[in-house]
Image (cartoon, helix red, strand yellow):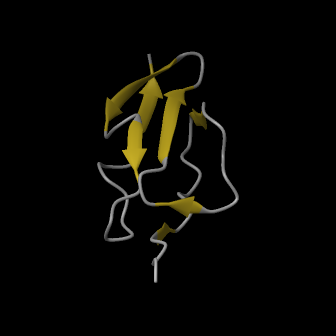
């Protein structure tokens, strides 16, 4: 029997947008890519997060602040 590993949807992050397609269900190896909105820059965290085999997201939530 195959077990599908799922991750919860990531929360919306202020001043960011997700730039890749958003699936209805996040499963192991799915990647979410963030980008800061115009006028903001990454000051912490990661733009790319991946659903891991432990149902957790890799990396740290991105933080974008005004330039």
Relative depth, front residue between 15 and 28: 28
Relative depth, front residue between 30 and 40: 30
Number of numbered discs overlaid on the protein picture: 0
- The residue sitting at 59% across, 24% down in the picture is 37
Q: Is residue 43 visible?
A: yes
Which residue of the protein is positioned furthest toward the front in this rendering?
Answer: 1
Q: Quadrant of residue 46?
A: top left
Coordinates of residue 8 in the picture (x, y in percent) = 52, 68
Which residue of the protein is positioned furthest toward the bottom in this rendering?
Answer: 1
**Residue 46 vertical placement versus 60 (above, below):** above
- The residue sitting at 34% across, 60% down in the picture is 52
Coordinates of residue 10 in the picture (x, y in percent) = 53, 57
Relative depth, front residue between 3 and 63: 3
- Is 15 on the left or on the right of 45, as rendered? right
Coordinates of residue 28 in the picture (x, y in percent) = 43, 60
Which residue of the protein is positioned furthest toward the right in this rendering?
Answer: 24
- The residue sitting at 48% across, 50% down in the picture is 30
Coordinates of residue 36 in the picture (x, y in percent) = 52, 27
Q: Quadrant of residue 49?
A: top left
**Residue 3 vertical placement versus 9 (above, below):** below
Q: Is residue 62 visible?
A: no
Q: Quadrant of the C terminus?
A: top left
């Amino acid at each position: 029997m195959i077990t599908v590993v799922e991750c919860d949807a990531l929360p919306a992050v202020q001043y960011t947008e997700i730039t890749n397609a958003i699936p209805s269900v996040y499963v192991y190896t799915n990647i979410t890519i963030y980008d800061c909105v115009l006028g903001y820059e990454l000051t912490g965290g990661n733009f790319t997060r991946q659903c891991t085999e432990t149902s957790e997201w890799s990396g740290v939530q991105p933080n974008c602040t005004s330039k």
